[in-house]
Image (cartoon, rainbow, N blue to C red):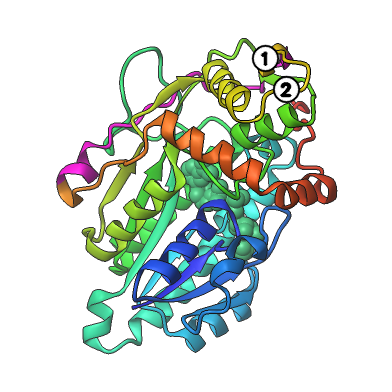
Amino acid sequence: MRIMVTGGAGFIGSALVRHLVADSPHDVLNFDKLTYAGTLSAVEKVSGSSRYRFVQGDICDVGTVRRAIMDFQPDVITHLAAESHVDRSIDAPGAFIQTNLVGTHVLLDEVRAYWCALPDARRNTFRFHHISTDEVYGSLGPEGLFTEATPYDPRSPYSASKAGADHLVSAWGHTYGLPVLITNCSNNYGPYHFPEKLIPLMIVKALAGEMLPVYGQGVNVRDWLYVDDHVRALRLVFERGTPGESYNIGGNAERRNIDVVKTVCAVLDHLRPRADGRAYADQIGFVADRPGHDLRYAIDASKIRHDLGWSPRESFESGIGKTVQWYLANEPWWQAIVRERQADQRRGLSAA
Ligand code: NAD
């Protein structure tokens, strides 16, 4: 098949591109604007393949989107391009509305025109797959899990823009018959993660000898999903999922933020002990909380397990071990990003 990946230079998109080019028979078009969050270095390993191509473009730009689709003639579009950082959405929501809502609308309209003109056989097998988040469901108390039937209740500009995009995608499915799929996943982590997000930020700050800034009391709970497990799930969904359905994807690994940070510290103590013999956990500090910080997200992933036979292979401990090892082995990659893109700056306090 010919798979167009929007956002293929980002964290999850690049993992999907690397997987598809290296471990599947599919041809891949990576369509990415290369914002601050995108880097082609994340797909360097596969970019020499004859089954890979790249177009730099904005999903909000009708002409570029149309040309890319018409030239590539995709069988599947996996849509990951987005503004993705909650803290940035608090300071500057406009970019999130633009890319996540307006951009998704442009893409849907162009895809619909393309799909309508396909011959019957290809029209029946075409899929548009939107990659979304568990944050659309809002915040949980200490009990309960998000299922695919949980009502949407987004509470940050980021999650509201993703919820809106999900609704647009389902509307294009219901109204126009476009064969759409939606997946809502929990927090991903792993190699090539932009170091503004919790786990890579803690690794780079720990190695720099800086304070490890934990928001509030560190009691917010997230479910953690190793990115390669997520990528396997995405491929199953667009290859075998039922159009019109949505699937929750989670790592079965709920942790409080403070426990995530302590685990990162313990792995670093083992793999790269501090020169002064002290523990990395001594660097932990508590800082002002994120405004509107959702308390807990937790995913019930039984539907994708039953319907498509997917389950995560990594435990939280094995995934964190792999991730820390990768950051230790790839310091030039993240050092350049921290230096050039101020990835490690605190954002999102403008509402406080
Ligand atoms: P990311 O921020 O690392 O990457 C986003 C990519 O999209 C970048 O390469 C960027 O250049 C590109 N992009 C941004 N605006 C664009 C535009 N207008 N046109 C074309 N390309 C554009 O994000 P990620 O963490 O890889 O997340 C990918 C998707 O998964 C997003 O839709 C996000 O909402 C969703 N998601 C992520 C997580 C997570 O834990 N990372 C969890 C749930 C859902």
* Residue 333 seen from this side: yes
Q: Residue at x 57, y 74 (%)?
A: 47
Q: At which x and y percent is residue 122?
A: 27, 83
In this figure, which residue is indicated by the disc labeled 2? 274
Where residue 302 sits, quadrant-wise, is top left
Residue at the disc numbered 1: 279
Q: Confirm or deny contact between disc 2 and disc 1 (CB under 8 A).
A: yes
136 in the magenta segment: no
Residue at 23% in and 45% down: 304
Left or right: residue 314 compared with residue 5: left
Q: Secondary structure at mark 1?
A: loop
Distance of mark 2 from mark 1, alpha carbons? 7 Å
In this picture, which residue range is highlighted in magenta?
283-306
Q: Earlier in the sequence, mark 2 or mark 1?
A: 2
Q: Residues within 10 Å of mark 1 (few under 14, many from 20)?
A: some
| Kind of residue sitting beneath label 2 | Arg
